[in-house]
Image (cartoon, grey):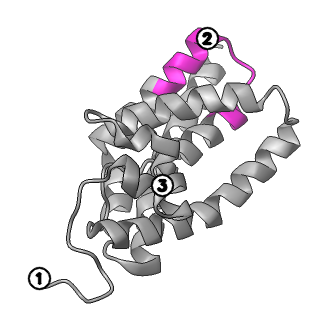
Amino acid sequence: MPHSPDIAPPRRPSVRFLLAHPAHFLALGFGSGLAPKAPGTVGTAWAWLAFLVLQLWLTPLGMGLLIALSLPVGWWACTVTARHMGVADPGAIVWDEVVAIWIVLWLAMPMGFWGQLAAFALFRFFDAAKPGPVAWADRLFKGFGARGGFGILFDDLVAAFCTLLVIALWRHFWG
């Protein structure tokens, strides 16, 4: 399939690419998506740490507002960055993991380190293995443009929902 003129040929992101556009900086998780191995896991770990730091300054309502703002801004950033990279859903784009784990932590807190680690592991499982509804969500919105940018976020939002469902069931039956 030939590239359209507004879509770059596929490229691996670099620090130069990261800093070339504000959308790249956000979509690549402030650089965490540049990790040479498992950028999604690195981005999720960065987001977990960022959430803990943000909690020092933001109320739960403030965190919720930040997450709400992060969704449309992230949609734009993912759309632009995927187009500039020439890949519909590049692994280096980790803003989808960032927002999704923030949602999980925001809704599941308070919990200690082990609970947070379990939430991290569950989310990574659902995001990487893509069982059932996550695989469906991953296939639903593909391509470049706004539809593809939304698709980058959507499967991670479904993975976050699955994670929260498991946490809720755990708390109901064993908590």
Q: Residues within 10 Å of mark 1 (few under 14, many from 20)?
A: few
- The answer to whether residue 4 is magenta is no
Q: Which of marks 2 and 1 is nearer the N terminus?
A: 1
Disc 2 residue type (three-letter): Phe
Comes first in the chain, label 3 or label 2 = 3
Q: Quadrant of residue 105?
A: top right
The image position of residue 150, as x and y in percent, is 48, 68
Which corner quadrant of the image does residue 109 belong to?
A: top right
Above or below: residue 174 compared with residue 137: above
Q: Residues within 10 Å of mark 2 (few under 14, many from 20)?
A: few
Q: Are marks 2 and 1 in contact (CB under 8 Å)?
A: no
Circle nearer the N terminus (3, 1): 1
Mark 3 surroundings within 10 Å by alpha-carbon count, few (fewer than 14), some (14 through 19), many (20 or more): some
Frontmost of labels 3 and 2 is 3
Q: Is residue 86 above or below residue 55?
A: below
The answer to which image quadrant residue 168 occupies is top right
The numbered disc on residue 19 is 3
Instruction: Please give the residue where the numbered disc 1 appears in the rendered image.
Output: 1
Q: What secondary structure is found at the residue carrying circle 3? A: helix
The residue that appears at 19% across and 83% down in the rendered structure is 3
Q: Give the range drawn in magenta.
A: 105-120
What residue sits 69% from the left and 17% below the top?
111
Q: In which quarter of the image is the C terminus?
A: top right
Res 109 seen here: yes
List the residue tagged with mark 2: 113
